[in-house]
Amino acid sequence: IVVDIRQQKVYAYNGNTLVFSTWANVRGTRRGVFRVQTKLAVAKSFALGWRLPNWMGIYYAGGLENGFHGPAYTARGGRTMTSLGCIVMPANAAATLYRWARMGTRVIVQS
């Protein structure tokens, strides 16, 4: 998986073949090479009270994990594409990537 911060895009490859791409809101995400280390159908941000669907964590930033997810469900029942270091994708795209990626899948985050 390649995340291009400048383009605000996510690309998934099987070898050299592009199998998936989507727009994503990428703000404050650390650049580097990571691996999918956590997969949860729905993660919970206790700090914000948000539910994060199709969660795939890739690195820790202090005591919090950053990663991929679909639009967050806020404490008031709304939805947001806000990125606080995560890679936030449209709901269908997040679900597709979640099903496709395996634990340990390499993730490159670049400018």
Image (spheres, helix red, strand yellow):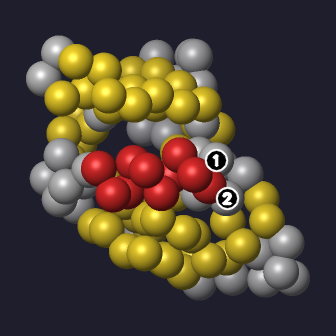
Give amino acid for label 1: Pro
Q: Residues within 10 Å of mark 1 (few under 14, many from 20)?
A: some
Residue drawn at x 14%, y 53% is: 104
71 on left or right of 102: right
79 w.r.t. 74: above or below? above
Which one is in front, 47 or 23? 23
In space, the residues marked 1 and 2 are separated at their CA atoms by 6 Å
64 w.r.t. 36: above or below? below
Q: Which mark is residue 90?
A: 1
Which one is in front, 14 or 59? 14
Q: Which mark is residue 104?
A: none
Identify the element where label 1 is drawn.
loop
Q: How many labels, in total?
A: 2
Position in image of residue 24 (x %, y %): 60, 36
Residue 79's quadrant in the figure?
bottom right
Q: Verify CB contact (< 8 Å) between mark 1 and mark 2.
A: yes
Position in image of residue 89 (x %, y %): 59, 45
Residue drawn at x 49%, y 77% is: 42
Residue drawn at x 58%, y 16% is: 7
Residue drawn at x 23%, y 34% is: 33
Residue 51's quadrant in the figure?
bottom right
Q: Earlier in the sequence, mark 1 or mark 2?
A: 2
Give amino acid for label 2: Pro
**Residue labelled with disc 2:** 71
Identify the element where label 2 is drawn.
loop
Position in image of residue 20 (x %, y %): 39, 31
Which quarter of the figure is the N terminus placed in? top left
